[in-house]
Amino acid sequence: MTSTPHISVIVPSFNHRKYLPERMKTILTQTRQDFELILLDDASQDGSGEFLETFLDRPGVRLIRNSQNTGSPFAQWNRGLREAKGDLIWIAESDDIACPQFLEVLAGVLEQHESVGLAFCQSNRIDENGVVISHSNQAGLNQVCQNDFRIDRGRAVSELLYISNAIVSASAVVFRRDLYNAVGSADTSLRLVGDWMQWCKMLLVSDLYYVAHPLSGTRIHTNTRRHSTASNGTLELESLTVQKRIRNSLNVDRRRIREATKRVAGSWLQAMRAGRFSGALPRHPLFLWRLLCTDFMAGISFAINWPYAFLVWLVKRFVVPSRYPES
């Protein structure tokens, strides 16, 4: 690590004390060491901040501790970017891991290709104990995920990022700081898909490079914001927001719009039929209205299937609630 860094590694942390030793080890043992390390603790209550303090005697390490939780991982992203001095940025989420060659490979891609603003790699899904479950499902990459590729600005958004977020883990990404700042900070009003929105903004004006080798590990566990809001409708509503932003910037094929809208609607109905949906009732008409505005036929299909799904939800939540605990 160095005080004149080419790369800034930002570690946003909140109540991940259990995973921090492995995460920090995989950062400090990178084969490329021309980076500064910015540690951000968002008012953790599990000793994370105290653990991170033990690294302050190393050169190029800074720790910023919040007295109150921001409630937004993307607010922490923005704080880290304001503090960063490096040309390249790695947001290394505090519960994930990386191979020693991660920075060497992805930073090397950006240095080799000036038009590429964002490079990301395949990522293994790992459990709470670090055991590999599978490769992450890189949405939209099913046909080409075995090979590295580069894709032009705009086309990356319309082909890979419209239906869903193909860049499934921020920890698997290295990007240019100037690009992030040029398109504007991450949207902190989005609780779950601020990363997806930010990638889209960046890739509307910059090329994308994908490295097929799994150099990152994305941890799957229950202590995440996504898990706690998995069935209240937030993800589906925010997904429609990102897709609308893309349509306002690019011409998206009508078939892709319908496919994406049907997928979001199906996710909502599935949560209802499983008895997991926990969102407020006014969210249902709001969601229907937004579906109709996006793709009328997908909205009509949702409206036809909603009564049955709602009946099943009522039965599972209130008639036999002991079998279907709160999510």
Image (spheres, grey):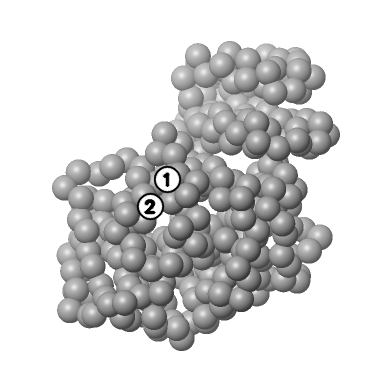
Q: Tell me the residue at 78%/63% (across/down).
A: 144
Q: Is residue 278 left or right of residue 83?
A: right
Q: Quadrant of residue 146?
A: bottom right
Q: Secondary structure at mark 1?
A: loop
Q: Is residue 325 visible?
A: no
Q: Position of residue 200 (x, y in %)?
A: 59, 46
Q: Is residue 245 left or right of residue 31?
A: right
Q: Position of residue 162 (x, y in %)?
A: 68, 42
Q: Is residue 184 visible?
A: yes
Q: Is residue 257 above or below residue 3?
A: above
Q: Is residue 197 above or below residue 89?
A: above
Q: Tell me the residue at 30%/65% (across/down).
A: 38
**Residue 100 image label:** none
The residue nearer to you, when weighing 204 against 268, is: 204
Q: Tell me the residue at 40%/39% (across/down).
A: 188
Q: Is residue 231 above or below residue 97?
A: above
Return the residue at label 2.
77
Give amino acid for label 1. Ser
Return the residue at label 1.
185
Q: Secondary structure at mark 2?
A: helix
Q: Are marks 1 and 2 in contact (CB under 8 Å)?
A: yes
Sequence-first tag of 1 and 2: 2
